[in-house]
Amino acid sequence: MEEEVKLIDSYKLTVGGVIVDVHIYFEPQEVVPTYNISILNISPTTNIILAKLREEFVSKINIETREYSEDTIDTIKERFREEIMLLIRKYFPNIDTKTADLLMNHVIQQNIGLGNIEILLKDKDLEEIVVNNSVEPVWVYHKKHGWLKTNVVISKEARIRHYATMIGRDIGKEITLLKPLMDASLKTGDRVNATLSPISTKGHTITIRKFSEKPWSITDLITGNTISYEGASLVWLGIQNELSMLIAGGTGSGKTSAMNAIANFFPPNQRIISIEDTRELTLPNTLHWVPMETRLPNPEGKGEVTMLDLVVNSLRMRPDRILVGEIRRQREAEVLFEAMHTGHSVYATIHANNAAETIVRLTSPPINIAKFTLSALSMILAQNRNRRTGMRRTLQIAEMKENGDAEVLMQLDIQKDALVKLREPKRLYEILNLYTGLSPADIEKDLAEKAKILKWFVKQNITDVHQIGLIMAKYYRGSFKL
């Protein structure tokens, strides 16, 4: 029996005045759906003329390549705008200004920018854009539909390398045969990894993890069923009372999104220092927040600023809270746990699949810190992504025992797709009683009030982190009433 092509989704994008039609469909002979883009407002005839224009323009670029070899993408685009416009006027003598600008942006995108990858970058529903080589089509990871093959193909390995070189040059990094690996970022905040053949044996690669245009809020996590009201209330209680927390999970499990969301609970009268390799966090603008980024060495091996440098330096900046992108090494972990022991609240992410694995990871090489120091940590929030369905969920919320073990308080019931309570907190309640005088009954009442506020956030559809920050400021002043 012959199967038909099945349309899964369709929508439109606008990129520099160019209207792009996106169709996601499943073809019977394919094993994954196809993500197809087509430009709507440039006719086939216009495309033929543009091809001639591009030939003339590219020949000019080749002549002048050396002159512009050290320029950034934006500088090169600016230098050639006038030249492109002259060619457009030559081939389209009666064109109006609006259409001329549209065609100019299209020519720049295709010949000086990242080509059709720039169209993919404009799709807010894409999380990852992957170039594997010049033979395969570009792959994308869609928020709703998972991994998809596109109809975009970069037909030459030299072109892939050219894109990687341009991206690196824009931020002062280089990728060469001697240095065939590169971590970089676009000006939009999107993270980029590139590799050159023969290290990647099938060809040059580029992997772009897109920066979320809208920061994740606690409301987003609740409405997406990532975390429950009760789980979010418990996390809020811990953060309000300055209890340190680690967010664990595998790659793509939503650790950074969860970090961004729980930062909604910070009070506005405390100084917050965040430390990341690539800036991803966006905290409410009501907060006293200083974001910091690491820096790789230049081609001469100078100027590096490491995560450890910034963690040590942050302790001299009178922080109340320290946020760290990821714990990877022993010295970073030792400094952070020392900060916890000296009264700072620390929040960090770590690669580990669950609470028990987090303890093993912390106490084994390469981090390898002493288990008795872990008692300074109060909570672990473990995130999980189901690779089959793409769903992200809070897997566990755990408290730390005095001996450095983790006690799971809430855990995801896979069958019910719900975060369920396993046991009542013990050490958390003891710590809160010691430092605040709150009894278990007082704490339960406070948790119920927090859940009520979170339900109001969802009902009012308050998802903007800055608006949530304002409400939190009122809450901590005691002037917020439902």
Image (cartoon, grey):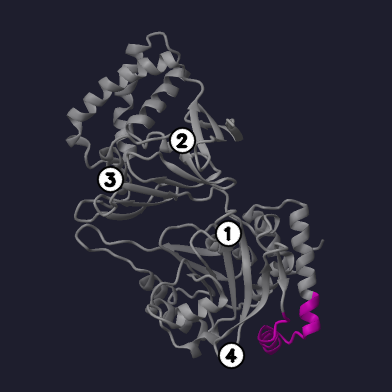
Residue wearing tag 1 = 386
Mark 1 vs mark 4, CA separation in Å: 32 Å
- Answer with mark 1 or mark 3, whichever residue precedes in sequence: 3
Q: For residue 402, which numbered disc appears in the image?
A: 4
The answer to whether mark 1 and mark 3 are in CB contact below 8 A is: no
Residue stretch in magenta:
423-445
Near-viewer residue (346 or 207):
207
Residue found at the far front of this picture? 1
Please determine whether, in this image, residue 335 is positioned above or below residue 456.
Answer: below
Mark 2 vs mark 3, CA separation in Å: 19 Å
Q: Amino acid at mark 3?
A: Thr
Q: Residue at x 42, y 58 (%)?
A: 278
Mark 1 vs mark 2, CA separation in Å: 28 Å
Looking at the figure, which quarter contains the N terminus?
Answer: top right
Q: Give the structural element (helix, strand or loop) at label 2.
A: helix
The local crowd at label 2, few if under 14, some if 14 to 19, many if 20 or more residues have their Cα within 10 Å, is: some
Q: Give the structural element (helix, strand or loop) at label 1.
A: loop
- Answer with mark 3 or mark 4, whichever residue precedes in sequence: 3
Q: Residue at x 54, y 43 (%)?
A: 124
- Answer with mark 1 or mark 2, whichever residue precedes in sequence: 2
Q: For residue 165, which numbered disc appears in the image?
A: 3
Q: Residue at x 61, y 69 (%)?
A: 269
The answer to which quarter of the image holds residue 91 is top left
In this rendering, does residue 86 appear at all? no
The local crowd at label 4, few if under 14, some if 14 to 19, many if 20 or more residues have their Cα within 10 Å, is: some
Q: Amino acid at mark 1?
A: Asn
The local crowd at label 3, few if under 14, some if 14 to 19, many if 20 or more residues have their Cα within 10 Å, is: some
Q: For residue 119, which numbered disc appears in the image?
A: 2
Q: Amino acid at mark 4?
A: Glu
Q: For residue 189, which numbered disc appears in the image?
A: none
Residue 118 in the image, given as x and y percentages of width and height: 43, 37
